[in-house]
Image (spheres, coloured by chain):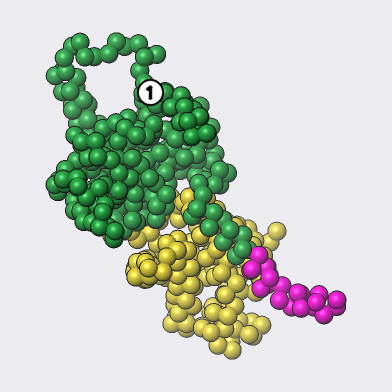
Amino acid sequence: MNNTVIINILRFALLVLTQVLIFNNLNFLGFINPMVFVIFFYWYPIKGNRAIFMLTAFLLGLVIDIFSDNLALHALASVTVAYARPAVMRFCFGVNYDFQNFSFKNTTKVQRITFLAIIVLIHHLIFFSFEILSITHILLILKKVFATGIVTLILCILFSSLFSPKSE
Amino acid sequence: MQRIINFVLRYRNAFLYAFFAFIALVMTFRSHSYHQSKFFNSSRWVTGSIYGAGSDVSSYFNLQEENQRLTEENQRLRKILFNSQEDSIQPLDSTLAVYEVLNARLIKNSFTSPRNYITIDKGEEDGVHQDMGVITTDGILGIVENVSKNFATVQSVLNTKSNINAKIKGTEYFGSLVWDTKDYTEVQLIDIARLVPLVVGDTIVTGGMSSIFPENVPIGTIKKYDLNASKSFYNIDVELFSDMANIKNVYLIENKDKEEIQELEARTIE
């Protein structure tokens, strides 16, 4: 049990609580409930075991699903984000990512926002596609993905600058 | 054999992803076609208690508004009571009453997803059980789906799986109340024959065909109507009386004759 594990467990619990108690009840403009817990995948240590990361992502999604009574939609979206994260990081940060001493410190703000935006996009696209599960409602899906995605992104950027971890 | 093992080891993350995605997909498709999961839902102790604690804090913010609404309802009910003929009031013998009414408080509301479930703070210990009807001070809300010791989840009318018997007030033309997920202030009434005369603004109430809700519980008013694809039935948009985004106190209705009715129906089908 080292420091990172404890920090991530705390983060897990706090993000679940803020998500289900605050952001799930926001209903901004009648339908926008930003999914701020996605920032977990941004904050999670880069050089971790991928299997544990995916398991954590699955559990995080599942817990939020149980609270929101939409079983396994968040779990599916989260585990996909966790699986795709290394590829997304390589896309956003280029060859730097493959170096041993890579950290967010030596990346530009634009790179980090792109990274966050792609994570949010993947998550929301999967979540709303499977929630609605109908090709005829494709416009509704896209509307929800982009409207909710933009709000989530803005909140995630705010969160990431508010609670920027100094150790990483 | 060695090669197969090497192959699996090399792509172990992909396999793990496929495994998790498979579990999640099975759960997702189950939730699309079956009832809500019995074990993983927000009526459970942990989730219920957390929602309860959250709701204890947030309920203070609109206490006054809620009181106002309940007072208005009392006023309306008292008016009916005072204006009704004395002899039409049934004797207050509780064994004779067909419907039992409980009250509960919402601890989690939801109206933006296609399958909305609501959590309330009463459970088995308070006499709640599955398939009780739930109404608000203004109209219909949903049906109890899962019950734990102290909490229960309610399948809202704003749920693609919801299907409630409804009719046009004052007539016996009945249809099914469903939701097209588009707008949380509107539900759709289908299977009303095209011969039925309709007027925008007509009131829709629950029908007598279900053993869950009593007859004539208000639902909403007709907002607009048109014929469906086969041109033989109407699709009616019904504007709900209940403001689904702002509910705190609800009533649960239990039909004491329900078991007898269902038993009889089951026997008849056999």
In this view of the protein, can residue B50 be seen by the observer? no
> Magenta region, mostly helix, strand or loop?
helix
The residue drawn where x is 53% and y is 84% is: A91
Residue that numbered label 1 is attached to: B100
Q: Is residue A123 left or right of residue B196?
A: right
Name the spot of residue A116 as percent of width and height, x first: 47, 74
Question: Magenta includes B5?
Answer: yes
Q: Quadrant of the N terminus of chain B?
A: bottom right
Quarter of the figure with residue B80 = top left
Name the amino acid, label 1: Glu
Indicate the chain coloured yellow by its letter. A
The residue drawn where x is 19% and y is 47% is: B195
The residue drawn where x is 58% and y is 87% is: A96
Specify few, some or many for label 1: CA neighbours under 10 Å numbering under 14, 14-19, or 20 or more. some
Q: Secondary structure at mark 1?
A: strand
Q: Is residue B230 left or right of residue A81?
A: left
* Residue B259 drawn above or below residue B172: above
Q: Nearer the viewer, residue B257 or B134?
A: B257
Indicate the chain coloured green by its letter. B
Name the spot of residue B241 as percent of width and height, x first: 23, 42
Q: Is residue A128 left or right of residue B47?
A: left
The residue drawn where x is 47% and y is 76% is: A118
Report the residue that reaches farthest toward the right.
Answer: B1
Q: How many marks?
A: 1
Please give the chain letter of the residue carrying mark 1: B
Q: Which residues are magenta?
A: B1-19
Quarter of the figure with residue B243 = top left
In this view of the protein, can residue B6 be seen by the observer? yes
Name the spot of residue B114 as percent of width and height, x first: 39, 55
